[in-house]
Amino acid sequence: DIVMTQSPDSLAVSLGERATINCKSSQSVLYSSNNKNYLAWYQQKPGQPPKLLIYWASTRESGVPDRFSGSGSGTDFTLTISSLQAEDVAVYYCQQYYSTGVTFGQGTRLEIK
Amino acid sequence: QVQLQESGPGLVKPSQTLSLTCTVSGGSISSGDYYWSWIRQPPGKGLEWIGYIYYSGSTYYNPSLKSRVTISVDTSKNQFSLKLSSVTAADTAVYYCARALGMGYDILAFDYWGQGTLVTVSS
């Protein structure tokens, strides 16, 4: 299994400030034949299912605000929220789909400072 | 707009079999473009992938659950189902069904999810 490890486990950021969440995979999720990173980010608010934010490590899903961005390659990835809004309070998960047995990070809880 | 809806008992006794169904609306399971999946989340914890099924019936399971899991599809009803046998309290979780795009040999991220259903294992 590919193990996904997120940091930090929780994060408090002031409104309007930048939030950064990291995700590290135990092996590369970069497929050399197409140069794509098989990495997604999800946002989960209380009582709701996860919502896909980003796939291919940096491609925003349709309708996702452009304050959300993804970066990284290989084994190290970052989700950045450029200017935190109140509605961004949630738990964020990374997920690899490089292997058929997909795995998720443990989640990062984002709160307002 | 695709919608997925889980249904099934909210309470299952230990050692019994958990059975859930996901009904897909707004799109056809038989389209061949997607893989259909079950994912669970114990209360207050993270996400665990259970398995995928393709409309043809091909399945992929989480190795840690493989001996107890069966996922099946009924294209005539536009539904797919989960059976998890020999359940214990550790199987208490919100169970989600979800859709992932298939692209060649790749199965991509989950773009549509059901609202989830809580299944409690208790006597």
Image (cartoon, rainbow, N blue to C red):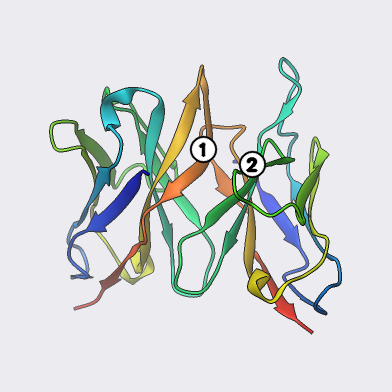
Residue beneath the point at 69% across and 76% down:
A86
The residue closer to the viewer here, B39 or B114, is B114
Q: Do the residues labelled 1 and 2 touch (CB within 8 Å)?
A: yes
Total numbered circles = 2
| Residue B76 percent location from the top left of the image | 13, 31
Q: In this view, does A81 lie to the left or right of B43?
A: right
Q: Which amino acid does label 1 sit on?
A: Gly
| Residue B4 percent location from the top left of the image | 32, 50
Residue that numbered label 1 is attached to: A101
Q: Quadrant of the N terminus of chain A?
A: top right
| Residue B39 percent location from the top left of the image | 42, 52
Residue beneath the point at 54% across and 70% down:
A45
Name the N-terminal-most of marks 1 and 2: 2
**Tag 1 secondary structure:** loop
The residue closer to the viewer here, B70 or B101, is B101
Quadrant of the rendered image containing residue A60: top right
Note whether A5 is above or below B122 in the view shown.
Answer: above
**Tag 2 secondary structure:** loop
Chain to which the residue tagged by mark 2 belongs = A
Residue beneath the point at 82% across and 66% down:
A83
Report the disc number at residue A2: 2
